[in-house]
């Protein structure tokens, strides 16, 4: 299932499942996640971490997404 939205000016897209997986973030339910702000990608995970350039505000969004979907 895909979920998307905006938190504190950061746009996100998350693909998450009912069951945890070895391919998920921290072996959780999120298999894909992108976080952007102002058209710039700061974080991308696609069954493995591609890159993580989050600042402190972006990190707070990331942590909130883990609570919501992982």
Image (spheres, rainbow, N blue to C red):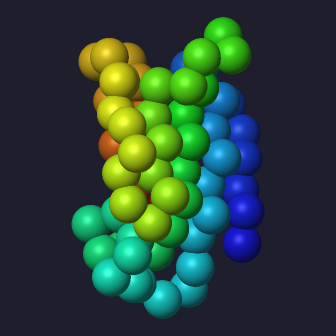
Q: Quadrant of the C terminus?
A: bottom left
Looking at this rendering, what residue extends furthest in the top direction?
Answer: 38
Q: Eyeballing the image, is 15 above or below 27? A: above
Q: Position of residue 54 (x, y in %)?
A: 35, 24
Q: Count all numbered tags in the image, as a single digit.
A: 0
Residue 56 seen in the current view:
yes
Q: Residue furthest front?
A: 50
Q: Quadrant of residue 15?
A: bottom right
Residue 69, placed above or below residue 38: below
Q: Residue at position x 72%, y 47% from top?
A: 4
Give the side of residue 6 with respect to residue 16, left or right: right
Query: Is 64 rendered above or below residue 31?
Result: above
Q: Is residue 65 visible?
A: no
Q: Which residue is rendered at x = 55% and y = 34% of the image?
A: 35
In the image, what residue occupies the spot 40% across and 45% down?
Answer: 50
Image point 38% across, 60% down: which residue? 48
Quadrant of image for the N terminus:
bottom right
Q: Residue furthest bottom?
A: 19
Taking depth in this image into account, of 70 and 31 the one nearest to the observer is 31
The image position of residue 61, as x and y in percent, is: 44, 33
Question: Quarter of the image holding residue 62?
Answer: top left
Residue 39 x %, y %: 69, 16
């Amino acid at each position: 299932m895909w979920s998307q939205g905006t938190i504190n000016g950061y746009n996100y897209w998350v693909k998450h499942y009912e069951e945890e997986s070895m391919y998920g973030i921290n072996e959780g339910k999120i298999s894909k996640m992108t976080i952007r702000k102002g058209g710039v990608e700061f974080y991308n995970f696609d069954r493995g971490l591609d890159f993580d350039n989050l600042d402190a505000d972006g990190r707070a969004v990331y942590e909130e997404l883990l609570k919501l979907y992982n």
